[in-house]
Image: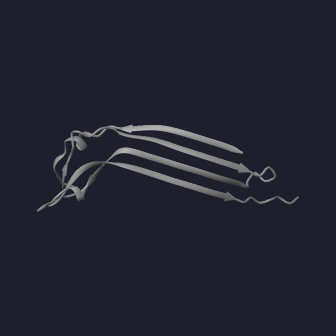
Amino acid sequence: MFFSVSIARTGRAPTHLELFADGPHPATAQYEVGDDTLEVEKGVNTEMSASASNRKCAAEQDDVAAFEAPTDGYLTFDARLGVGLADGVCLMLEARNLTDEEMRVRSRPGRKSHR
């Protein structure tokens, strides 16, 4: 039986475009507006897992894993906050709280060798 736990702290500062954008984006035909009051995105990721294998057949293994990654202040351009313009859509930058979760259960039956 094997157990594993990992914890990681992450952060990302806003780019200069996210802070100071105020004009048309030629490639997407959208008008982007930044926000110079944005703060650093912060997150703490946690993952726990356990696995067990059959001593008689090493290829036979069962796994269970869980993962969570909440992010405070996730930066995204959002068209719903903007207003329509004659030459495109206005995108306003917004900080949101985002959580990504996943759980996996896996069983791999092995083949027993016959001698």
Residue 48 location in percent, x, y?
58, 45
Q: Which quadrant of the figure contains the C terminus?
A: bottom right
Residue farthest toward the right in the current orientation of the protein: 115
Residue 4 location in percent, x, y?
62, 42
| Residue at the spot 56% in from the left edge and 50% down from the top edge | 66
5 to 65, vertically: above or below: above
| Residue at the spot 49% in from the left edge and 38% down from the top edge | 8
Left or right of 33? Residue 72 is right
30 to 69, vertically: above or below: below
| Residue at the spot 24% in from the left edge and 59% down from the top edge | 80
Q: Which quadrant of the figure contains the N terminus?
A: top right
Q: How is the image coloured?
A: one colour
Determine which quarter of the picture holds residue 84. bottom left
| Residue at the spot 52% in from the left edge and 54% down from the top edge | 102
Residue farthest toward the left in the current orientation of the protein: 86
24 to 84, vertically: above or below: above
Q: Count the labels in the image.
A: 0
Left or right of 90? Residue 41 is right
Q: Nearer the viewer, residue 33 or 109?
A: 33
Left or right of 28? Residue 101 is right
Left or right of 18? Residue 61 is right
Residue 3 location in percent, x, y?
65, 43
